[in-house]
Image (cartoon, rainbow, N blue to C red):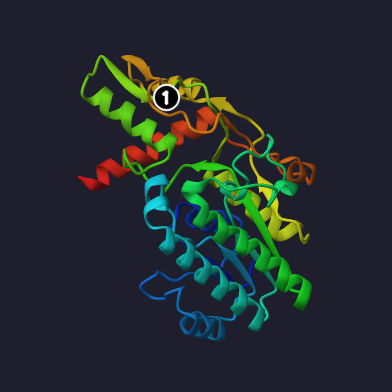
Amino acid sequence: MDTSAKIYVAGHRGMVGSAIVRSLQAGGYNNIVVRTSAELDLKNQAQVNDFFSTEKPDHVFLAAAKVGGILANNTYRADFLYDNMMIEANIINAAYVHEVKKLLFLGSSCIYPRLAQQPLKEEYLLTGLLEETNEPYAIAKIAGIKLCEAYRDQYGCNFISAMPTNLYGQGDNYHLQHSHVIPALLRKFHDAKQNKQPFTEIWGSGTPLREFMFVDDLASACLFLMNEYDGKLFVNIGTGEEITIKDLAYLVKDVVGFEGDIVFDSSKPDGTPRKLMDSSRLHSMGWKHKTSLRDGLAAAYGFFQHELIREK
């Protein structure tokens, strides 16, 4: 990408989209186009086509999506399937019609079969049944991958896809019931520290293994792929490193400065025993994440504290 190229970041207010905007700005890209959902309804095909006709972006980062935790995914199954399919279909088709030079579609690691072999390789897509609770979201993301491939095959469009691992960092959701594991732990230990609790309880045995990536590292990978990768097959974006939930909890406890004990409630569900993505294809291209988990957690805790100050 030329630094003066017009770049549209769809979903710029989300954790991923905002990180991509920060990375672009840091890289000297000075012609970034964004729209809020109030300004542009991405589910409305006419509005999306009008936007592309007027703005004529050269490059598109498709980070817009309807997202939520397990409860939301399982409760609003029709909304998660319909909204995400409409968003991606409208943007990908408009990018073709209005001759966008290159588009990067962002998916999720939930696209892989529930019982897929670990670590998860790109070729494992569609080799087994999906996790039931987030199947609609996963199907929508798989449809986005296949749309990019189909527009490439039929029309020669340079549309690529990338699947990130579990993310955390600036712009995360720190709600105790509705957030993912890292922001939930940060909030839990912070509250326990403030309330001087003698211990805090963590669901499960702590034995499952998970992989985590700082969201600004993901944004760096997205810019790398936009500049360096033109292949049809989607690309996993991960660290290649995993940690048990127990070790993660103690690491977060240390970063937050909570001095009490941790109690693991093994009567609560653990979830999938292991979830690691194989990112060797991306690493072989020359990209590797830069932020260690401890440094990323310290930064994320700083963002969380800043959010608390803003709320007050």
Say which of 48 and 66 sits in front: 66
Q: Is residue 2 visible?
A: no
Q: Residue at x 62, y 38 (%)?
A: 115
Image quarter in which the C terminus is found: top left
Quarter of the image for residue 243 reads top right
Residue 5 lies, in percent from the top left, at 64, 72
Q: For numbered disc 1, what is the local secondary structure?
A: loop
Say which of 199 and 57 sits in front: 199
> In the displayed structure, does residue 158 sit left or right of residue 67?
right
| Above or below: residue 40 compared with residue 232 | below
Quarter of the image for residue 93 reads bottom right
Q: Residue at x 33, y 33 (%)?
A: 187
Q: Is residue 162 visible?
A: yes
Number of numbered discs visible in the structure rendering = 1
Q: Amino acid at mark 1?
A: Gly
Question: Crowding at label 1, few (<14), some or many (≥20) Cα neighbours within 10 Å?
Answer: some
Quarter of the image for residue 255 reads top left
Residue 184 lies, in percent from the top left, at 37, 35
> In the displayed structure, does residue 110 sit left or right of residue 81?
right
Q: Residue at x 45, y 60 (%)?
A: 80
Residue 11 lies, in percent from the top left, at 48, 63
| Above or below: residue 115 compared with residue 151 | above
Say which of 21 and 103 sits in front: 103
Residue 252 lies, in percent from the top left, at 43, 25
Q: Which residue is mark 1?
A: 204
Q: Residue at x 60, y 76 (%)?
A: 57
Image quarter in which the N terminus is found: bottom right
